[in-house]
Amino acid sequence: MTPTHRGTFELRDHTADIALHVRGASIESLFVTAADGLYATIGDLRCPPVADPAIATPQAAARESITLHAADREGLLHHFLSELLYRFEIRHQRLSAFDFDTFDDTALTVSADVAAVNMDASVMDREVKAVTYHDLRIIQSAGGYEVTIVLDI
């Protein structure tokens, strides 16, 4: 298990795919920890520092807001991770420092820092082709929430 300050995740082998098992104390921490796990599945993604030594004051990180809608929380998690995967694959971006502005069972709005990924300096472990719906079920327990996400690799 890989602990983060939000929750824990672990990668599990799955036939022709990889399963990402995630735990979080809250539903928000579950989503953020799932994002950490997705990025860890891809590899060691290197982003240049926000501060430029040639500039006297550090630059502020770019911040963007994302709004998603789905039929349920599982659909929201799928859309959230798919959006992060799209931004990585197409725009070479990594999102972090998530703040959930609104969050309910069918919609969320989240703000996040956006950093460019240095593809040459990053170490890619595997290509994630898609986030699947296979057995995607968020479970609430006394300790918080957990889910297993199957990633198509």
Image (spheres, grey):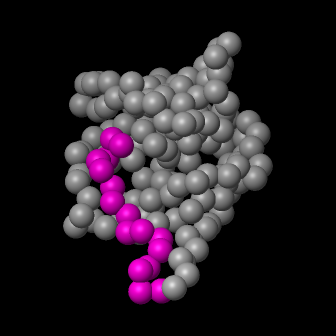
Percent x, y for residue 42? 31, 47
Q: In which quarter of the image is the C terminus?
A: top left
Percent x, y for residue 63? 61, 68
Compared with 125, 138 (above or below) is: above
Q: Please give left or right for residue 81 compared with residue 12 in the image.
A: right
Compared with 139, 17 (above or below) is: below
Compared with 80, 143 (above or below) is: above
- Answer whether residue 137 is visible to the viewer in this image: no
Q: Please give left or right for residue 110 compared with residue 128 in the image.
A: right
Please give the name of the residue rendered at 58% of the width and 74% of the height, measured from the top-left corner.
Answer: 60
Q: Please give left or right for residue 152 compared with residue 135 in the image.
A: left
Percent x, y for residue 34? 50, 38
Q: Please give left or right for residue 121 compared with residue 106 in the image.
A: left
**Is residue 41 shown in magenta?**
yes
Compared with 50, 54 (above or below) is: below
Please give the name of the residue rendered at 61% of the width and 23% of the height, measured from the top-left corner.
Answer: 145
Q: How many labels does the image show?
A: 0
- Name the residue at the front extreme: 56
**Is residue 147 shown in magenta?**
no
Q: In which quarter of the image is the N terminus?
A: top left
- Answer whether residue 58 is visible to the viewer in this image: yes
Please give the name of the residue rendered at 53% of the width and 26% of the height, measured from the top-left corner.
Answer: 23
Q: Quadrant of residue 120?
A: bottom left
Please give the name of the residue rendered at 68% of the width and 13% of the height, measured from the top-left corner.
Answer: 142
Q: In which quarter of the image is residue 144?
A: top right
Percent x, y for residue 119? 27, 65
Residues drawn in magenta:
40-55
| Camera-nearest residue between 49 and 84 | 49
Dominant secondary structure of the magenta stretch?
Answer: loop
- Name the residue at the top extreme: 142
